[in-house]
Amino acid sequence: MNPAEYIFLIIMFVTMIGALITVLSGSLIYAMMGLVVTLFGVAGLYIYLNAPFLAMMQILIYVGAITILIAFAIMLAGPMSKRPKEWTTATKFIASLAVSLISFIVLYKAVIRGFWVKGKVEEVVMTTKDIGRALLDRLTFPFELISLLIVVSIIGAIMLSLLSRRGK
Amino acid sequence: MTGTYIFNNLYIYLFLALFLLCSGILGILYRKTLIGMLISVELIMNGAGLNLVALNRFTSPDNTYGQVFTLFIMGIAAAETAVALGIVILIFRKFGHIEGGKLKEMKD
C-alpha cells in the first residue's frame, strides 16, 4: 500500500471517532472538541478530493469561527455543575439508536445500488481561479443571496440580545 | 493521482458522509441540551458538504459546482449557528436552563 493510503485511512478513522465522541460524550465541551476533530478530518478528506481551497475554508470558517461561537455559548449557558448530564434514559437512547441504524441501512442500500455516472478518468485539477469564476460568473445571484442571509442573521442575533436585555 | 487507490473510490466518501449523517441524527434525537443538538446539526451539514464535493470530483470533474455549493453550505451554517446560539442564550436567560425537553411554554 501507498503511504498516501495509510494517511487516508488514518484520516478516515479519526473522522469517524471524532463523530462518535461528538455524539456520545457526556459533557458539552468534550462534544465540541470531538466536533473540532471531525472538522479537521473532513478538511483532510477535502484535500484528498482535490479541493485544497475548501479545506482551508473548512478550517477557517468551521474550526475558527463556528466552534469558537459554540464554545462561547457553552460558557455563557450556566456553570458546569448546574448543567444537566447528557445521559438520558436507556429507552430513549435505544430508540434513537434504532432510528439512526434504520436510516443508515436504508441509505446505505441507496448508496450502493445508486447509479452514479462515471466521469472522465484523467485528472482535471480545478484551481481556486475556477471556483472564483463559477462563483462570480454563473452563480452570482446565490452568492448575493448568501450575503443577504448573513446580514439578516447578524441583525437577528443583535435584536435577540437587545430584546432579552429590554425584557429584564 | 489516478489509479486504483483507496481514496479514488467514490463509495468510501459516500459511506463516510452517511456515517456523519447518522451520527448527527443520533445526536439530535438523544441529546438533552439545545447546544448539543446544534453540534449534531453541524455534523449533518459536514456530511452534506462531503457528499457534494465527492460527487463533483468523481462524476463530473470538469466543473466546480459541488465545491461552490459546499461554500454556500458553510455560509448557511455560520448564519444558522449565530441565530440559534442567540436563541439559546435568550432561553437560558429566561428559563435558567437549556434543556430541550423541559421547554413547555413558548411565551409567558
Image (cartoon, rainbow, N blue to C red):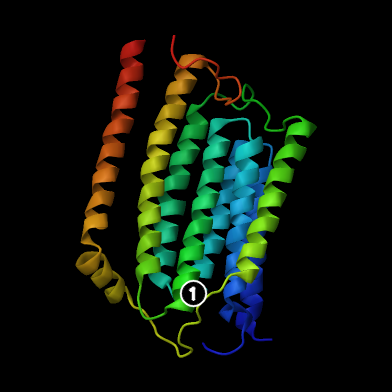
Image quarter of the C terminus of chain B? top left
Q: Position of residue B75 (x, y in %)?
A: 35, 51
The answer to whether residue A11 of the structure is visible from this angle is: no
Q: Horizontal placement of A103 versus A162: left or right?
A: right
User: Residue A124 or A56: which is nearer the viewer?
Assistant: A124
Q: Residue at x 26, y 65 (%)?
A: A135
Q: Which residue is mark 1?
A: A49
Q: Horizontal placement of A112 versus A58: left or right?
A: right
Q: Residue at x 69, y 44 (%)?
A: A99
User: Residue B14 or A152: which is nearer the viewer?
Assistant: B14
What is the crowding at mark 1: few (fewer than 14 residues within 10 Å), some, or many (at least 20)? many
Q: Horizontal placement of A120 versus A12: left or right?
A: left
Q: Horizontal placement of A126 versus A8: left or right?
A: left
Q: Position of residue B73 (x, y in %)?
A: 40, 54
Please state the chain letter of the residue tagged with numbered disc 1 in the rendered image. A
Toward which corner of the image does residue A28 lie, by quadrant? Answer: top right
